[in-house]
Amino acid sequence: MNEHRSFFGDIQRAFLLTPDLIIELERKTGAGIGGLSRRFFAGEFSYRELTEVIRLGLIGGGTDPEEAAALISTYAARMAVTELYAHALPIIETVMFGKTQPTPKTRKKSNA
């Protein structure tokens, strides 16, 4: 599976939702991954869903579960909801679509 990497808290971290953590996410949120992802893409999510995606993503990326919980309580609690969403959405996108490669920029063709 592909991981997503981003700066969270005090360093660059890996985020990964493995199949067992997806099941735990579904259990904790009471929603299937399909419905959860649709709501995320539509911007219809709960605060708890945001923090659970990030916390479980940290655990899947190799962070100790206790440290992941501490990072959520220390850093996520101080973030705006839109900032949390910006962290959680790529984790869900990676689960649903895999790691996408950046689209190369194309140069404009001249009329000469």
Image: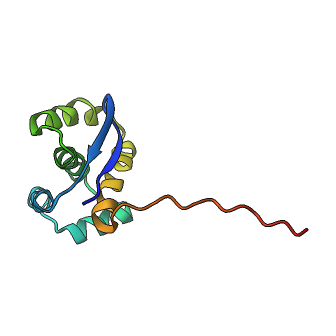
Residue depicted at 25% across the width and 54% down the height: 46
Residue depicted at 34% across the width and 67% down the height: 97
Task: Name the outermost residue toward the right.
Answer: 112
Residue 61 seen in this snapshot: yes
Residue 44 seen in this snapshot: no
Q: Quadrant of residue 84?
A: top left
Q: How is the image coloured?
A: rainbow
Residue depicted at 34% across the width and 55% down the height: 89
Front in this rendered view, residue 86 or 3: 3
Q: Looking at the picture, does residue 112 appear above or below residue 49?
A: below
Return the x and y of residue 86 as percentages of the image width and height: 39, 48
Q: How many marks?
A: 0
Please state, as top left, top right, bottom left or bottom right, where the N terminus lies in the image.
bottom left
Front in this rendered view, residue 35 or 2: 2
Return the x and y of residue 18 as percentages of the image width and height: 17, 58
Q: Quadrant of residue 59?
A: top left
Q: Looking at the picture, does residue 10 appear above or below residue 27?
A: above
Please state, as top left, top right, bottom left or bottom right, where the C terminus lies in the image.
bottom right
Q: Looking at the picture, does residue 94 appear above or below residue 52?
A: below
Looking at the image, residue 28 sits to the left or right of residue 11; the answer is: left
Return the x and y of residue 36 as percentages of the image width and height: 24, 65
Residue depicted at 29% across the width and 59% down the height: 92
